[in-house]
Amino acid sequence: MNVKELLINQASLFPQKCAFNFEGRETTFSQLKDAAFKIANYFTRQGVKKPDKIAIFTANTPDAIAAQMAVYSIGATLIPFDFMLTENEIIHLLNHSEPRALIMQPKKDINVLNIRENCYSVKYIITCKERLPDCDFLDDILAEESNESPVGSSFDKDLAAIFYTSGTTGHPKGVMLNYKQFDNPVDTINHFLGISENDIYCTGGIPFSHVGGLNYLLLMIRFASTIIVMPRFNPLEFLKNIEKYNVTIFCIVPSMYVAIVSLKEYERFNLTSLRYAVVFGAPSSPALLKRFHRSCPKAIVLNGWGMTETAAPNTFSPADEHKISSIGKFGFRMQAKIIDEEGKSLLYGEKGELLVSGEGVTLGYYREPTLSSDAFWGEGWFRTGDIAYFGKDGLIYLSGRKKDMIKVAGEIVFSSEVEEKIQLCPKVQEAAVIGVPDELRGEVPKAFIVTKESETINEQELRDFLKEHLAHFKIPHYFEFVKELPKNRVGKIDKTAFKKTIEVKPDEKNEGETNPQSEEEKNQQSEGEIT
């Protein structure tokens, strides 16, 4: 993808059209091109060019959009940092990635002097929103630099970005994508959804430091579409934006859908402008999506799949409500197969790890040769960590993440399945399930439950409900009712927050928890059977 040429083209064809709207303020394609080129020319004047790396540490703002476009316009490598990172995390990642320049929005708990003293590769620091000593100020750059087309450009194989993602291991991994791979998400979305300059997207607060947020920017400049930028996710504001700006497409994660349908007034909004509503990022409940679909029956609700490592998205479920529990078929520039632990390819109905290959697959993890090697199987097959199976219809269905499998006395339980069944309970807003140690069974499920506002439910009532939907060994042995579930920056439930603090002992009963062993289970155990 040649971002510089796209900016020139769209500014020429649609100079006064809104490229993005931020809190009611519009920026046209002409204004975006000028701002991006001014920042790009500042870098080239300072001698910063490809293959140099430039880090960005900002919230979702107009400055962030212009800065990203500037980096790509000169073919340099962008390193976008999540704005929720701490000072120590920022310093660590700066030293790992070694950028030559940093564009940052000052924060209360971030000392720029510490960054300058501890990050020797960073020669230039540009601040936005606030002037700081010994730093250049972005507003001055926008006022003084030329908006002429900058020197330099990108080629397909040039390194475009390094996205740091910790996944669930807590070890930040720098996912490398080149400029050619930037074509993958927009081409895939266009292939499945059909995009035009008439489409309007709402970001929902997905950070631009993540691939999901980047995709909105790429769609904007490729198709001259308009994006409604939200600094953070707020379900009420999200619905208001859809109605106010006639949004046609959005892509959000399951927990955001939960927050939306939990609003008492969500069905009152006019969502008739929607063409597609897509869920990404985690196994989702078909019942939840169907419930949301009632508020926008003209829209097509889809389930999508992709990872940072595969330049997401890569596939979508068919436009058929009965198939929404699948992730569809691969085939557009990507291939998939499912293997067992020995590497044997599996047939219909057999569960194993999903492997993918194709143009979108990452070049590897930056400065992590062992992690990069371990992430692949055979010739170019990336190990996704998702457990999946082929249905008789040829579609792929996810069972859960490999890391989220709970082995209960030899029986495999997927936390996503248990969560889905818990959320069928009309009194439950959302749930998270993890495996905790158990002396008899090895592991047992533990559920963290958030009830709907003004609703109450006790453990026995919930247990009785689950008996109608789950085998007894899948029913959580522990329940804890909490006010909210921890979320990461893209809105996914952060189970590592639970796993870091939980340590349940088999006979321990804490406040709000029980070890609810049925008489049937006790009798089976007395006969030498562990369930």
Image (cartoon, rainbow, N blue to C red):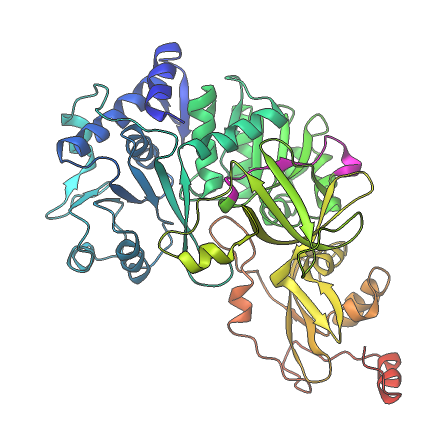
Decide if residue 23 is on the left or right side of residue 527.
Answer: left
Query: What is the x, y in percent for residue 388?
Result: 70, 51
Decide if residue 69 is on the left or right side of residue 239.
Answer: left
Marker count (numbered): 0
Query: What is the x, y in percent for residue 455?
Result: 70, 59
Q: Is residue 274 visible?
A: no
Q: Please state which of residues 177 and 370 is positioned toward the viewer in this rendering.
A: 370
- Quarter of the figure with residue 171: bottom left
Q: Is residue 499 visible?
A: yes
Residue at the extreme bottom of the image, as rendered: 526
Decide if residue 327 is on the left or right side of residue 494.
Answer: right
Q: Please state which of residues 483 and 276 is positioned toward the viewer in this rendering.
A: 276
Query: What is the x, y in percent for residue 135?
Result: 14, 45
Residue at the extreme front of the image, as rendered: 379
Write down the region rendered in magenta.
310-323
**Residue drawn at (30%, 22%) of the image:** 33
**Residue drawn at (38%, 16%) of the image:** 10
Residue at the extreme left of the image, as rendered: 134
Q: Please state which of residues 366 and 404 is positioned toward the viewer in this rendering.
A: 366
Asked if residue 314 is among those painted magenta in the image, a careful observer would answer: yes
- Quarter of the figure with residue 288: top right
Query: What is the x, y in percent for residue 522?
Result: 84, 84
Vertical order, 268 against 376 (above or below): above
Vertical order, 531 against 420 (above or below): below
Asked if residue 78 is among those painted magenta in the image, a careful observer would answer: no
**Residue drawn at (56%, 33%) of the image:** 250
Image quarter hosting the C terminus = bottom right
Image quarter hosting the N terminus = top left
